Image: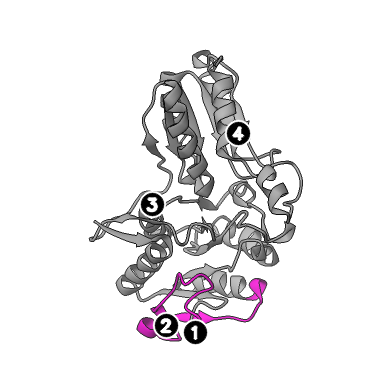
Amino acid sequence: MKTIQFREAIAEAMSEEMRRDSTIYLMGEEVAEYNGAYKASKGMLEEFGEKRIIDTPISEAGFSGIGVGSTMTGARPIIEYMTFNFALVGIDQIINNAAKIRQMSGGQFPCPIVFRGPTGSAGQLGATHSQAFDNWFANTPGLKVVVPSNPYDAKGLLKSAIRDDDPVIFMESEQMYGDKGEVPEGEYIIPIGVSDIKRSGKDVTIVSYGKIIKDVYKAAEILIKDNIDCEIIDLRTIRPIDHDAIFESVKKTNRLVVVEESWPFGNISTEITYQVQNQIFDFLDAPVEKINTADTPAPYSPVLLKEWLPNYEDVIKSVKKVIYYNS
């Protein structure tokens, strides 16, 4: 095993797949000459050349559409957004073209494309640059949505996403690019749609994904001092969701807390809550708790931003609530 940064895991995944398959190319703003806005494509222009590592104008609608169209000629593009906030400019290409083209063509045109870039809050970036669109894209039939939380998962899942014959939304975080983690030296992939139990426990199940799961780890370390043993499930993929893994865990712990960086209405945690109460209601010993951002646009003030985002203290409070803990 070697220890690398999250951004390096992304670059390795793309480079390894591009060496394996000449139909793969990377396109987006600053991916070539600048080595990527977050240096996630460092060195790739030098290795693969300007025909496969392509800088674009600031025109997400344009290069998203070019990417989708190129799949119909046999290419397998990776489209990088500087942030998924900018993907809103190209969302018609993603939703109405990439996600639907296989069905609308009667199966004649698969759409093997990856749209990737950072999602969610990344500090003081203001309301229009701090939105989590995970559940927006997950609401779309035809798309797969992947949100890794560490370098190991990021590399293995991105390789799977690039090989997939359907469009994949691959969401990262600006605040994770410098995170370090162990990654195997050799070839490996992680299948899309399979969650991972990051910590085994017996008292409560906590489900999360993406960068916010780090607050869950911190909460679990504090809670164990009170003899509260948390099981942590990292979804990794939110479309499709690995419901079975959640069900099996809740059957053991009988309690569930879902932590998600999103607005509270109509999100992934709402879907999980419904499925659990619908499928395994009799195993629950307490109502499901879900933790989300405040139901407002993201504030700029760091004091307000801290209150807006879910944090480890929220997790501790919710866990103690579902186990009826009295200190």
Asked if the residue at tag 2 contacts the one at tag 1, i.e. Cβ–Cβ closer than 8 Å, the answer is yes
Spatial CA distance of label 1 from label 2 is 7 Å
Name the side, left or right, on which 4 lies relative to 290. Answer: left
In terms of sequence position, does the residue under pointer 2 or pointer 4 come before the other?
2
Name the residue beneath numbered marker 4: 314
Residue 98 is drawn in which quadrant?
bottom right
**Image spot of residue 273 (x, y percent):** 59, 29
- Identified at 52% across, 51% down, the residue is 145
- Residue 45 shows which numbered tag? 2
Q: Which residues are magenta?
A: 34-62
- Residue 111 shows which numbered tag? none
Residue type at the position of mark 1: Glu
Whether residue 310 can be seen here: yes
Q: Residues within 10 Å of mark 4 (few under 14, many from 20)?
A: some
In terms of sequence position, does the residue under pointer 4 or pointer 1 come before the other?
1
Residue type at the position of mark 4: Asp
Q: Is residue 15 above or below residue 181?
A: below
Spatial CA distance of label 2 from label 4 is 44 Å
Residue 320 is drawn in which quadrant?
top right
Asked if the residue at tag 3 contacts the one at tag 1, i.e. Cβ–Cβ closer than 8 Å, the answer is no
Spatial CA distance of label 4 from label 1 is 42 Å
